[in-house]
Amino acid sequence: MQAPVQKRRRPILPIAMVVLVLLLAGGWSVVWFYASREANSRFDIFLADEAARGRDWTCHDRFGGGFPFRVEIGCRAVQGNVADAGGRTYKVTAGRFLLLAQAYEIGKVIAELEGPLDLASGDGDVLLHGDWKSLRASAHARPRRIDQVDVAGSGIAGQAPGLAGFPGQSNDFAADSLELHARIRERHGDTADIDLAASGDGLVFAPEGNSPPPFSVQARALARNAPLQRTADPVALFAGAGGALDIERLKLVQGNSMIHLRGSLALDSQMRPEGDLELAAGGGDLRTPGAEGAFGGILPIMAMALRFAGKPTEIDGEPASAANLAIHNGEVRLGPITLGNVPSLR
């Protein structure tokens, strides 16, 4: 009698693994497409909000991607038409823009912008031209709400021929590195207290015909009662909300010369800065020729005023002289000495 032939069993485990992988891939695809749709919706909301405030941005050749782990939204080029509170119009153009987020956390975004960037008046006059090696920003964002922004750039260079106070000049500027940070400390309805920080190295501002040495900057401040609305007239909104800027530290270093500033500033009824600050200058003998060109030649003038009104102090362990810098009714005084006037910020 012939023995029955046993049927060969197909292995269950490999089949189950394949099915599981297919289910996971299908499920993740659903998650990614949902995240991509949500990110694009938030981007559209941002553009619509900007347009409602007089800032029309055009994303040329918009594209998307990033599957499977990232969500990407990009523009081959960016163009904007912006109006300020005075009705003046400006045109902004820049290179490729890319917005990145992880598919599982689209509230944390990274933005990259390529140059060059050009800012021109409505009449076509070039006000600013700049380019850079890298420029990246990151943000913790929700629809119509941003909690933190960090910006970092390197290899920055350009010209600002339309800069107020230096008309008709090339006004070259550059920075080896530059970082800006803003984080909301506490919200108060439509306003918030915002921690601010900035740092930069290899900074240069050179009006035509000048070639000053580079300087560095370190800054920490708190913006109190800062309005959260995006508006064409942020200065008036800041003043109306009772906003103020508490400067914890502003340190400038050029060569062996230093300036340090701290105190509080607000805006008066004519939108001019007002407040009381402590100004210190130090770093070597400020009366020597080596310091004459420091900070545009203002440091020796400042040192002369501090010899009459200042008191000994230190800047990070270095000897310096400090005095009260008072800004009231549009007038700037260093101790008893009047230095000049400040204009309205509008």
Image (cartoon, grey):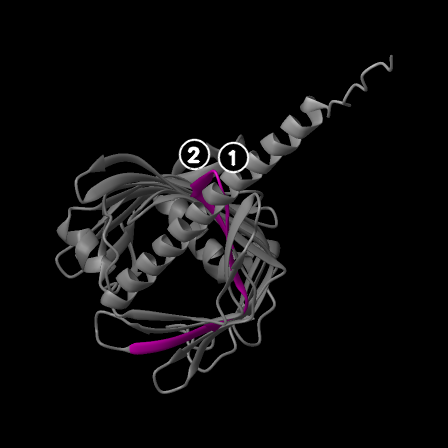
Q: Do callouts 2 and 1 mark residues in contact (Cβ within 8 Å)? A: yes
Residue 179 is left or right of residue 228, and the answer is right
Q: Name the residue under label 2.
A: 312
Indicate yes or no whether the magenta region holds residue 82. Answer: no
Residue 306 is left or right of residue 277, and the answer is right
Residue 143 is left or right of residue 111, and the answer is left
Q: Position of residue 236 (x, y in %)?
A: 18, 59
- The first of marks 2 and 1 along the sequence is 2
Query: Residue 12 versus residue 74: which sits nearer the camera?
Result: 12
Q: Can residue 53 be seen in this view?
A: no
Q: Name the residue under label 1.
A: 319
Q: Where is residue 231 in the image (x, y as percent from the top left)?
A: 23, 60
Q: Which residue lies furthest to the right in this view?
A: 1
Q: Position of residue 157 (x, y in %)?
A: 58, 65
The type of residue carrying mark 1 is Pro
Q: Residue at x 27, y 52 (%)?
A: 333
Q: Position of residue 153 (x, y in %)?
A: 56, 54
Which quarter of the figure has residue 244?
top left
Indicate yes or no whether the magenta region holds residue 94. Answer: yes
Rendered-image quadrant of the N terminus: top right
Badge count = 2
Q: Residue at x 43, y 56 (%)?
A: 301
Rendered-image quadrant of the C terminus: bottom left
Q: Distance between the residues labelled 2 and 1?
A: 7 Å
Q: Residue furthest front?
A: 1
Magenta residues, start to end = 89-111
Q: Residue at x 57, y 49 (%)?
A: 67
Query: Residue 331 versus residue 23: which sits nearer the camera?
Result: 23
Q: Which residue lies furthest to the bottom in this view?
A: 123
